[in-house]
């Protein structure tokens, strides 16, 4: 191996190790998986540039990185060496495959020119070649039981995405390196490199901000849950305080409360005290009154009853002492039978709380305790509520609460399941006592609150771990990083392709320019043909048609009724059809003018009633053979500003259309003045009692060459141009037209034309 080969190997290995370590910058909690593995791209570019020595460097660097990740020793052989070796082999195979595919399919030199396909380059070194390393790596990890089989596919996907994007990120550099010898403008190359690196930095910065925002969002969600849980705990403490006071008020109101009365009242309080294990009345009994109390309670219960205390884990009769604090009345009884008669003063911690209760005459809770009746390992506390008589505490209510039951009763289950809650009694700073603990494993974030309750201080620690973060995490951070890098990569490849394709672009420009010129010439020729055609129609068609129509009219005038009626009928048909054909040609010419923008109108005040009379006169022959009546109402205006010829043509076309599709009934023209958007307009309605138009065809009535009536209706000679012309003429007047129709009932065509005040006057 030459010194140069060793240098290549060291350069490839050092770069791979540095980029592999730097990938930690892109890790996303809680799994700390990096969605980008830039070392894969470095391996490809070194393999293309340096050949096989680079593969050796990649192998050793990958091996060392995986030993670091597994926290194994480099000096003592272990299974981790085998795993790291297989993973490193997969990285080498991937780099070699990517190098071969890039040279084979994406890069090829032809003389002084380099042919590059950036899409193929990105695909072969990224998604395609990157199938190798994750397949080898995950197979190895599964084989050695490092990764469970059920999560293998997801880990493979993350690995493949990281390698693919990491390799694609170096695609522009590979492209640049392959074409560098053929470029004569190094300044452009430097500008591109600087800009590309800047874009990567911007994407990385955006990723960091997105990751920070995501962490802050999760923290905010956690803080909201903490606030909800904490307020729930405070409300629960208020509720149990109220429950104790409620029982105490019973004894203060009625000094002689019997056991059955207590049970009845305590049952109602107990049912509305979630988390409570029992409610009891504890009298303060002097030694002289002990027998009296024991006998009274035994009689109430119908069984033996005595004051008790705990001795070596068993319940024994209470020792003689000056005062007793027995659990006397208790509800519910059966679950708490073992605690019945228990002298709370026999326990030093409970006795301290009782003495504090008597001296302060206020609620007191005990330090965390294990209940006499406890069968599990829950911690609990007692809430003592004083009952006063003659301005001193004569007895008290003892309420039993297990911490876990109290939390489950008040805190939402969703919070209990995801947030770790630890409650510690820190009244004595030097001797904190655990009341409740639900750890979340490794703590990522926590909030500590203090609660003063019953003359003691609790410290409540709310915490979250990796599972909480995983449950509340969105894919936004992954999306920002992956999509950001893909966009930058595509942009870089695109810019490089532009820089390397000047000649191709110039050629394409020339080809497209010639194509555009040819298309323009074709368009000009077509326009010229159209112009010539219209001129031909105007002269060659209309002139002979006018002659035919004129001679037909003369013949009809010359022929007397005594002549052959068949001949008269034939000449009449010639005249009518010739007139129809002439109208059709005129319509086509008018539409052509509108389309070319050459149609102009000359507005002048016109007499509406007079024009409508002319319209009726023109339409009258169309209804001579039909049971149809044409009615025209008196217009509300004398004049309107419009083009007389086009105005008349609008309503001739609308009237002819109405008559054409009406078998019997009437065609009526009426008017109305309306105000639209602060401007007055004259609405002219053409109504008919014809066959009507189906809803699905209404939108097509103003389209050219569209006929939506009965296609084979006898006598229908419509071309589909009349209503199209109406729409164009109305638009040229600054108006609008609308049609409403009902099949079998008829149609209404409404034309709105703006009213000119001066013309009206």
Image (cartoon, grey):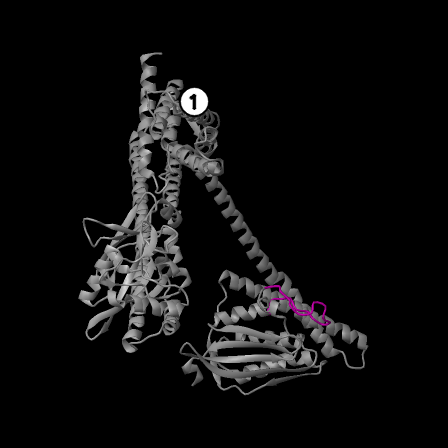
Q: Position of residue 485 (x, y in %)?
A: 37, 40
Residue 308 against residue 260 in the figure, above or below: above
User: Could you tell me which residue is drawn at 49 percent across and 70 percent down?
Assistant: 731
State which region is magenta.
Answer: 704-722
The verdict on residue 712 being magenta is: yes
| Quadrant of the image containing the N terminus | top left
Mark 1, Cα crowd under 10 Å, few <14 / some 14-19 / many 20+, is few
Q: Position of residue 690 (x, y in %)?
A: 66, 77
Q: Quadrant of the C terminus?
A: bottom left
Tell me the quarter of the picture where residue 483 sits.
top left
Judge whether 500 appears above or below 334 on screen. Answer: above
Question: In the depicted view, which residue is nearer to us: 415 or 527?
Answer: 415
Q: Residue at x 48, y 37 (%)?
A: 153
Name the residue tied to disc 1.
111
Please tell me which residue lies in front, 760 or 133: 133
Tell me residue 169's x, y (percent).
Answer: 37, 34
């Amino acid at each position: 191996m030459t010194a140069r080969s060793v240098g290549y190997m060291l350069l490839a290995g050092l770069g791979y190790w540095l980029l592999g370590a730097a990938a930690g910058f892109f890790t996303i909690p809680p799994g700390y998986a990096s969605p980008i593995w830039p070392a894969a791209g470095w391996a490809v570019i070194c393999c293309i540039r340096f050949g096989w020595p680079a593969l050796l460097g990649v192998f050793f660097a990958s091996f060392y990185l995986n030993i670091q990740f597994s926290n194994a020793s480099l000096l003592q052989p272990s299974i981790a060496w085998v795993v790291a070796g297989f993973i490193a082999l997969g990285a080498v195979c991937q780099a070699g495959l990517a190098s071969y595919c890039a040279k084979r399919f994406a890069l090829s030199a032809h003389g002084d020119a380099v042919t590059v396909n950036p899409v193929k380059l990105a695909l072969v070194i990224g998604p395609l070649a990157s199938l190798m390393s994750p397949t080898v790596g995950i197979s190895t990890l599964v084989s050695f039981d490092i990764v469970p089989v059920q999560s293998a596919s997801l880990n493979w996907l993350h690995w493949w995405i990281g390698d693919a994007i990491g390799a694609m990120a170096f695609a522009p550099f590979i492209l640049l390196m392959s074409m560098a010898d053929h470029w004569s403008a190094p300044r452009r190359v430097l500008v591109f490199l600087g800009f590309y690196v800047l874009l990567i930095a911007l994407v990385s910065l955006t990723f960091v901000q997105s990751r920070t925002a995501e962490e802050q969002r999760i923290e905010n969600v956690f803080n909201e849950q903490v606030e909800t849980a904490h307020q729930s705990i405070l409300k629960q403490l208020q509720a149990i305080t109220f429950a104790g006071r409620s029982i105490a008020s019973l004894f203060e109101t009625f000094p002689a409360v019997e056991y059955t009365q207590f049970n009845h009242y305590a049952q109602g309080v107990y049912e509305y005290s979630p988390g409570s294990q029992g409610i009891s009345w504890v009298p303060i009994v002097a030694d002289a009154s002990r027998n009296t109390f024991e006998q009274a309670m035994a009689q109430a219960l119908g069984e033996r009853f005595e004051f008790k205390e705990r001795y070596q884990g068993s319940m024994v009769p209470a020792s003689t002492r000056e005062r007793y604090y027995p659990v006397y009345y208790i509800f519910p009884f059966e679950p708490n039978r073992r605690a019945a008669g228990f002298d709370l003063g026999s326990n030093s911690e409970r006795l301290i709380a009782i003495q504090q209760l008597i001296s302060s005459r206020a609620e007191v809770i005990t330090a965390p305790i294990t209940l006499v009746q406890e069968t599990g390992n829950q911690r609990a506390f007692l809430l003592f509520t004083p009952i006063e008589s003659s301005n001193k505490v004569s007895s008290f209510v003892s309420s039993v609460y297990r911490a876990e039951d109290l939390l489950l009763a008040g805190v939402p289950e969703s919070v209990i399941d995801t947030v770790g809650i630890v409650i510690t009694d820190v009244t004595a700073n030097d001797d904190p006592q655990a009341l409740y603990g639900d750890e979340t494993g490794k703590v990522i974030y926590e909030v500590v609150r203090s609660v003063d309750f019953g003359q003691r201080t609790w410290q409540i620690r709310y915490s979250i771990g990796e599972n909480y973060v995983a449950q509340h995490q969105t894919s936004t951070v992954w999306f920002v990083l992956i999509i950001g890098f893909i966009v930058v990569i595509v942009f870089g490849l695109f810019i490089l392709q532009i820089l390397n394709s000047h000649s191709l672009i110039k050629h394409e420009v020339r080809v497209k320019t010639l194509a555009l010129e040819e298309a323009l010439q074709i368009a000009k020729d077509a326009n010229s043909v159209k112009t010539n055609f219209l001129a031909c129609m105007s002269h060659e068609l209309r002139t002979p048609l006018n002659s035919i129509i004129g001679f037909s009219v003369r013949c009809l005038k010359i022929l007397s009724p005594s002549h052959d009626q068949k001949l008269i009928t034939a000449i009449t048909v010639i005249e009518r059809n010739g007139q129809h054909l002439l109208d059709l040609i005129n319509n086509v010419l008018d539409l052509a003018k509108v389309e070319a923008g050459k149609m102009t109108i000359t507005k002048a005040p016109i007499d509406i009633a007079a024009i409508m009379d002319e319209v009726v006169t023109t339409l009258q022959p169309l209804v001579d053979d039909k049971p149809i009546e044409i009615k025209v109402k008196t217009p509300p205006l004398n004049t309107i500003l419009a083009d007389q010829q086009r105005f008349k043509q609008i309503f001739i076309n609308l009237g002819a259309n109405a008559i054409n599709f009406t078998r019997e009934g009437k065609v009526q023209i009426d008017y109305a003045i309306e105000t639209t958007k602060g401007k007055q307009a004259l609405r002219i309605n053409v109504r008919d009692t014809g066959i009507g138009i189906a809803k699905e065809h209404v939108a097509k009535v103003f389209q050219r060459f569209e006929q939506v009536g009965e296609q084979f209706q006898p006598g229908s000679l419509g071309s589909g141009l009349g209503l199209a012309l109406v729409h164009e003429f109305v638009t040229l007047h600054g108006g609008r037209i609308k049609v409403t129709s009902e099949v079998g009932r008829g149609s209404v065509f409404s034309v709105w034309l703006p009213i000119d005040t001066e013309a009206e006057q």
